[in-house]
Amino acid sequence: MSAAAQIGVTGLAVMGRNLARNFARNGYTVAVHNRTAARTRALVEEFGHEGEFVGTESAEDFVAALERPRRLVVMVKAGEPTDAVIREFAPLLEPGDMIVDGGNAHFADTRRRERELREQGIHFVGTGVSGGEEGALNGPSIMPGGSKESYEALGPMLEKISAKAADGSPCTAHIGPDGAGHFVKMVHNGIEYADMQLIAEAYQLLRDVAGYSPAEIADIFRTWNTGRLDSYLIDITAEVLAHVDAATGEPFVDVVQDQAEQKGTGRWTVQIALDLGVPVSGIAEAVFARSLSGHQDLRDASRGLAGPKAEPLGKAEAAAFADQVEQALYASKIVSYTQGFHEIAAGSDAYDWDIDLGRVASIWRGGCIIRAAFLDRIRAAYDARAELPSLLADESFAREIGEAQDDWRAVLVAATRQGVPAPGFAAALAYYDALRADRLPAALTQGQRDYFGAHTYRRTDREGSFHTLWGGDRSEVSA
Ligand code: 6PG
């Protein structure tokens, strides 16, 4: 077997197959391998005309087909399946070779794998790949972690197959060492959940309060997609809402069960944020909204509970309300991205990754599920001020969210009065109001904690920790 392949892909389910095709279409000779050899043969037979594939049916042949330093892309399920593939291939590799994990792995697994393989001189590159099947084939956003050395050998290839932003720049870049790439992909998915939840709430408000049909709401989303909400998710939302179910002639959205599922990356984002002490309330509400939708028994038992049913507005009021919903959606979106980027910054500090937030925004401008014109604004904000403490500290975002105030609050009043759940909008506004508050009720919380647990508190007027003798004369002592 001649070692002529510049890249190899093992795991030829849809994502792996499309990534292999993308490399081949871009002129690389691609070694391909799959546990079921028939799938390897099928790929070469069906897509061999797109470029140079080297079909291999054993791990040894697959490795032998790769030029040095060998670059193996692993596209199998996260968790044990990935560990199993690493155990199969690592013994066949030599120092300087690299294993690229393109699955949705948990960044802690990636850090472990990178450390273990580094001891064998092998680069392990945990890589977030976003954009689904279409992205894998035509250009995803790619978020590689791992060593700088591995990016020197791998980066030019990833830049060639990645999506390109409107200015032509590749939607990939070295994110940072070890698990940084998978961490950023995890937060990407958390933001994706928040984005999708906010869109869902906007839809429900336009449906129940404004009284529009799915087809009419599709048109509203199409209009929003020509402005500051221009994004992949807004675009496909219009498509989904305009779709009519062939079997019933009903709007597609009305024949789909209203129980959202989740593979887990959004959940991880919240779990890690809890550990890092980062309030990602918008992402958390999106995860919980999916979980709540799945508790059918709880929902069935609660249907009769007292509360208003939405009364649709008249035509003129409905149009005005739709404009208010756009403001609330945009303002809440700014908050969700603020929270997501805060988590990336906190992870970067905690794991010493030195992640460039402007670069993350830059490679999310194309290819990924949250791709949006909005991300160019975020890139510009971080490029202008790398130490930006929060996106809300950027003048242009602060101005826009200020302009949205009245409408944002009016939408939440309507949602509350009409009994339409809007946890994402509400969490975003609560986060915003808490950040800008002069005093928070956390002072009372500290007093309570000191009362029942002698957990001490700090004072506003002098340094130190203190405790009040609640059970005695209530005098204060230094702790
Ligand atoms: C992407 C997507 C993808 C995601 C699936 C399932 O970036 O291409 O985020 O990685 O895992 O679409 O997502 P759920 O968590 O909603 O099941």
Image (spheres, grey):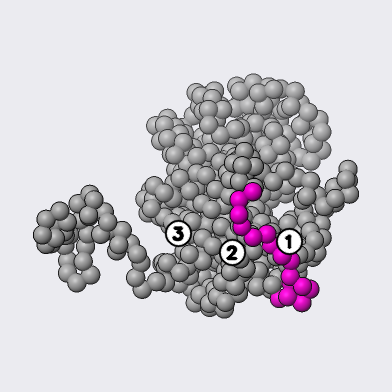
Q: Do tag 3 and tag 1 residues touch (Cβ < 8 Å)?
A: no
| Amino acid type indicated by mark 1 | Arg
Q: Residue at x 63, y 31 (%)?
A: 10
Q: Within the image, what quadrant is residue 443 found in?
A: bottom left
The main secondary structure of the magenta stretch is loop
Measured as percent of width and height from the top left, residue 393 is found at: 45, 72
The alpha-carbon separation of the residues under discs 3 and 2 comes to 29 Å
Which residue has dot 2 on it? 416
Residue depicted at 71% across the width and 61% down the height: 208
- Quarter holding residue 300: top right
Nearest to viewer (mark 1 / mark 2): 2
The C terminus appears in which quarter of the rendering?
bottom left
Q: Amino acid at mark 3?
A: His
Q: Is residue 114 above or below residue 253?
A: above
* Left or right of residue 350, residue 185 in this image: right
**Marks 1 and 2: CB-CB under 8 Å?**
no
Above/below status of 41 relative to 48? above
Magenta stretch in the rendered image:
304-320
Q: Residue at x 53, y 35 (%)?
A: 99
Disc 3 residue crowd, few under 14, some 14–19, many 20+, Cα 10 Å: many
x and y, in percent, of residue 262 in the image: 61, 42
Relative side of 417 to 475, left or right: right
Spot occupied by residue 241 in the image (x, y as percentages of width and height): 78, 56
The dot on residue 207 is 1
Of residues 114 and 411, which is closer to you in this image? 411
